[in-house]
Image (tube, coloured by chain):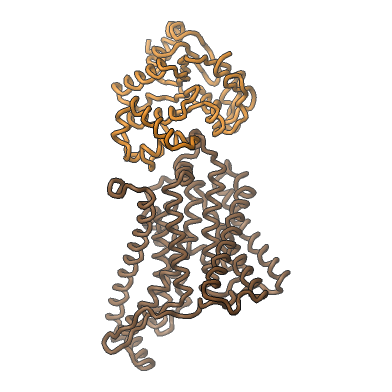
Amino acid sequence: MSLLELENIHTYYGHIHALKGISLTVDEGEIVTLIGGNGAGKSTTLRTISGLVRARHGSVKLSGHEITKMPPHQIVMSGVGHVPEGRGIFPRLTVQENLEMGAYTINNPAEVKRRMEEVFTLFPRLKERIYQKGGTLSGGEQQMLATARGLMLKPKILLMDEPSMGLAPVLVDAIFDIIKKLNAEGSTILLVEQNALMALKVAARAYVLETGRIVLSGTAKEVAANPDVKKAYLGG
Amino acid sequence: MERIIKSTVLRELLRPLGQIVAFVLGTGVILSILMFLISLIANKSAASLALIERNGIDLFTYTLINLPQVLVDGMALGFVYAAIALGYTMVYGVLEFINFAHSEIFAMGAFIGVELLLALNAAEKLSNITVATAFGWLFVAILAGMAASGITAVLIERIAYRPLRGAERLVPLISAIGVSFFLQDAIRLTESLTSGQFHRIFPTFGNFDERVSVLSFNVASTQMILDIPIKSLVVIVVAILMLVGLNYLVNATKLGKAIRSVAQDRNTASLMGINVNFVISMTFLIGGSLGGAAGVLYALKFTRIDPFVGFMPGIKAFTAAVLGGIGNLTGALLGGIVLGMVENFAGAYLGVFTMGNFGVEYKDLISFLILILVLIFRPSGLLGEQVSQKA
C-alpha cells in the first residue's frame, strides 16, 4: 500500500476543468516529482491533496484512509505537510511565530520548543533571525522558513510547491541539498518543480503533467531520458 | 522592545497602555494648541465681543475654562468609538470586507444591557444599593451586552456571510446592509411589542450621575474646575481595560496568533492546521462583544437609546477605523481617540466661535469631512500599510 494514493482526481476552478483524472502514488521514503509547464495542474494537484480546492470526482488516500472530503486543517493533522507556492510566509509574524504556527496543533509548549530546536539544526540561519518579521527575510531564507514550518508537525508526507522559484542558483542548490537530506532522514516528499533538471536529479520517480493529465510517468531516470521531456523541459 | 522586556505578558499589557497614553496626550495637546491659536486670533472678533457681553469673558478665557471638560468628554467618546472601530477593523482584517451590520450589533448590546437594568430596576433591585453593588450590576449589564452582541455577530457571520464567502466582494457587503436593516427592525418590533415604545432610557441608579472634582485652580482670576461625571470615568476605565485586554488576546495568545495568521494568509493558515472557520467565528465573537460593551457604555453616557442608535456611532467608528488604517488594531485605537476628541472639540466650540450660526449640530459634519479627506488623500489611513487595490 502506498503512503499517498490519488485515484482519478478531477478538479475544477469554476468552469475550468483543471485536473482531468490524475492518478498517482507516493511510497513511504520516496521523493516523487511532478513536472510540467505553466498551468499543467501541478500546484492544483497539491492543493487538491491538502483540501484547499475540492476534487469533484476521485479519491485521495493517506495510508489507505480516505482524506478527500476532509477540511484542510484536518488533512494537516492526519499527516500532510504542505509548503505552498510562493512560500506562504506570514509577513508580519516573526520567524519564531511562523514556526509556532507550523506546530499550531501541538498543545505542549515544551514540545514545540524542542521541535523548533530540531529544525534549527537543519536551518541554523533561521535561529539567527528568530525575532525578525517573516516579510523582511530574503527569498532563500523565506523558503527555508516555509520548509522548516512544514516540518514542525513531522508530517508523514511533505508536499513542496516550487521550492526553487525565484531563488538565485546557489540557493537553488542549497534547497535541493536540504530536500535530499530530509529524504535521507526518512521524509517522504512530493515535489512540484519548474526546474525539471534539478527535480529529476533528486527524485526517485516522476510524473509529467500536461493540461491536467499525466502524460508520462516512470523512474526519474526513465523520464529524464525521454526525448519529449528532454526537448520540452530539459533544454535539449 | 523584545529584548528589553522579556516577559511577553508584561510587554503585551504595557505596550497598549503606552499607546493609549501617547495617543490621548498627542491628540489632546495638538487640538488644545490649535484651539488656543484660533481663539487668540478670533479674540477681537464679533464672536468674542458677543461672548463678553453675554458671559463677561472673552473667547480665549472661554476656551481655557472649557478645555479640561472637553478633553475628558472627548476621551470618553473616543474610547467608545475605538471599541466599536476594533470590531470593524478585526473583521476587515480576516475577511477584507466591511461588516456594516456592526452598528446594529452595537445597538443589540446597548438594548440587552439597558433592558436587563430596567428589569432589575422594576424588581427594585437597583434602589437603595451601595456603590459597590451598583458597579456590580453595571458590570453584569456590560457582560450581558457583550454576550448578546458577540453571539449575534457569530450568528450573522454563519448565516449571512459564510455562504457568500467565495462570491464577488460586493455581495457580502449588500448582505451586511440587509442584516443591518433586519436587526434594526427586529429591535424595533421587539421593543414596540414588549414596551409599546421605541426608545429606552438608561435607569438612574448608583452614583454614576454624580461628578467628582479632580482639580480646581485659578488662571488669571478665572477659577477653573475640572469635575468629571463618574459615568465618564467608568466609560474611560472600562474601555481602557477592554482595549488592553484585546491587545493582549491578539498579540500574546495562541488564538490571537491564529487570528493574525488567518488575516495575513487564509489558505496558508489552514495548511498550519488552523480551523479557519472557527477562527473567523472567534473574530466575530470578539469584535461583536467589544461592540456590545461599547453599546452599554454608550447608553450609560448618553442615557437614551432607540433602535437606530447604532447608526451614527457605527458610521463614526467606521470613519475612525478608516482614519487609523482599516485592518490595523492600533490604527483603530488611534482613529477612535482622534475622532472622539475632534468631534467633542467641534461640539463644544463651533457654536460659540460662529455666534450660533454653525452650532453643535454640525459636529458630525466635521467627522465626515475627515472621512472624505482621508479617503482622498490617504486611503490607507494614518497607520495603515499601503494596500494594493483589491476592489
Report the chain shown in brown. Answer: B
- Of residues B142 and A197, which is closer to you in this image? B142
What chain is colored orange? A
Write the residue at 54% across / 32% down. A52
The residue furthest right is B193
Task: Measuring from the top left, give residue B3's x and y in whole percent.
Answer: 28, 46
Q: From this view, report whether residue B370 is shown above or below residue B169.
A: below
Which corner quadrant of the image does residue A10 belong to?
top right
Question: Does residue B284 sit above or below B365 in this rendering?
Answer: above
Quarter placement of the C terminus of chain A: top left
Q: x and y percent of residue B270 in the render?
A: 51, 36
Who's the residue at 50% across and 14% down the image? A207
Residue B132: x percent and y percent? 52, 72
* Figure quadrant of residue B195: bottom right
For residue B50, say whether it is visible.
yes
Is A231 on the left or on the right of B118, as rendered?
left
